[in-house]
Amino acid sequence: MSCFSTEHAQQLLHNKYVAILGDSIQRSVYKDLVKFLQDGNFLTEHQLKCKGEKTFLKDTLIEGGVLEEMHNRVTYREVRQYRTNHHLVRFYFLTRAYSDYMESILSDFKADQKPDVLIINSCIWDVNRYNDIQLKEYKSNLQTLFRRLHEVLTPESLIIWNMTMPAGFRDTEMPEYVRYNIRWDVIDGNFYGATFANLYDLDVVDMHYHFRLELPHRCKDAVHWNQIAHRKSTQILLTHIAKAWGVEVPRGASVSGAPSRVVTWRSGNAEPFEKDRVLGRDSCRWEKEPLRGYCPGYTSFDERSRDIRGAPPRGPYPFHGMNMMMNIAPHPPFPPMNFGYFPDHKQFEDQQRLPMRRPIKQRDGRIHPYRIPTSFPSRIY
């Protein structure tokens, strides 16, 4: 995993607009990013649990939260914004992948400044709050959402579908029919979300894979995560953004598949990008070298593979060609041979007894191999 520091994060997101859309887990992603842009400390438990507060680390509550009614229904709204001279991070609370409220958010993007980075996720509310057992509405909403994102945002915007982290169930809030199926519904929702996002050429970060072994960092409600897990999530997202923009990941990180165009970090440089910024996702792709010659376990049916030496041809004898080293036929089968006449066995008579070499000692009822001591008389009179 990468080792971004606060200075690296400030340089990477310098003069950039980052929008985060999702549920309470994505709100924690927003809070940890705001905290990481200011200092390298972790969030406190109180900061993770609070929702809808007027201010959080110098940010502003724009809509919803304590400004309106606080509740846990699907109509809950919360819009937050953290803004400095060189950074802009905004959060929108979502309860469904696509709805009229999501269309209003897209209208804001279309009328106002478009985000440079869009981190979005919506799964847990979709699979257990709308009685969508077969996830048909969820799949339809995902396709509509990704299509609208392509229509509203420009190719310069980096859209990241942030997959849902492993979740359990809550006995107090979830209905009975999804209480014990939320784990599998999240897996199905992640599969559909990643598949449709790939079809619409969007970036996907598999947080479910990264945190499949980090369950000790999950909270008691089995849905939310602690500050250590969210700091790891921030590092993963920053690494993905850096690779997508062609920026070198800080030293000490082990990242495979880095793009060819790399920009080094320079001290005192607040804009670590090239003048001709790499656009699109083509800069992060690389082509594999074609196979040359014969590869064990690889079979090709094109014209170039005709010169590859295959198995030897079959011969007149069965199993011919099985000996790959010598490539010779085995010995022909032996002719039938007559071994003569075998006399019949003498039948055993039931009344005939075979003599024993030693007489069998009659047992006296004891089966223990050692002598059993006599029982002591009872002391109770």
Image: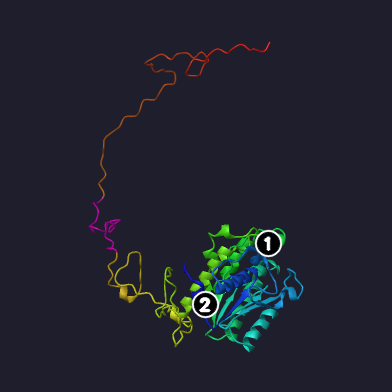
C-alpha gap between disc 2 and disc 1: 42 Å
Residue tagged 1: 178
- Estimate the x, y position of residue 172 in percent, counting from the top left: 72, 59
Label 2, residues with CA under 10 Å away: few <14, some 14-19, many ≥20: some
Q: Residue 47: name its quadrant.
A: bottom right
Give the structural element (helix, strand or loop) at label 2: helix
Most foreground residue, 49 or 357: 49
Residue 51 counted in the magenta span: no
The three-letter code of the residue at mark 2 reads Gln
- Estimate the x, y position of residue 278 in percent, counting from the top left: 46, 84
Most foreground residue, 24 or 347: 24
Residue tagged 2: 10
Residue depth check, mark 2 versus mark 1: number of the one nearer the observer: 2
Residue name at image x 48 percent, y 76 percent: 242
Q: Residue 380: name its quadrant.
A: top right
- Estimate the x, y position of residue 36 in percent, counting from the top left: 55, 72
Q: Residue 135: name its quadrant.
A: bottom right
Q: What stretch is highlighted in magenta?
A: 311-332
User: Pointer 2 and pointer 1: residues touching (CB < 8 Å)?
Assistant: no
Label 1, residues with CA under 10 Å away: few <14, some 14-19, many ≥20: some
The three-letter code of the residue at mark 1 reads Val
Residue name at image x 70 percent, y 68 percent: 129
Q: Is residue 291 left or right of residue 184?
A: left
Q: In this view, does 353 lie to the left or right of 162?
A: left
Magenta span: predominant SS is: loop
- Mark drawn on residue 223: none
Chain-order first, disc 2 or disc 1: 2
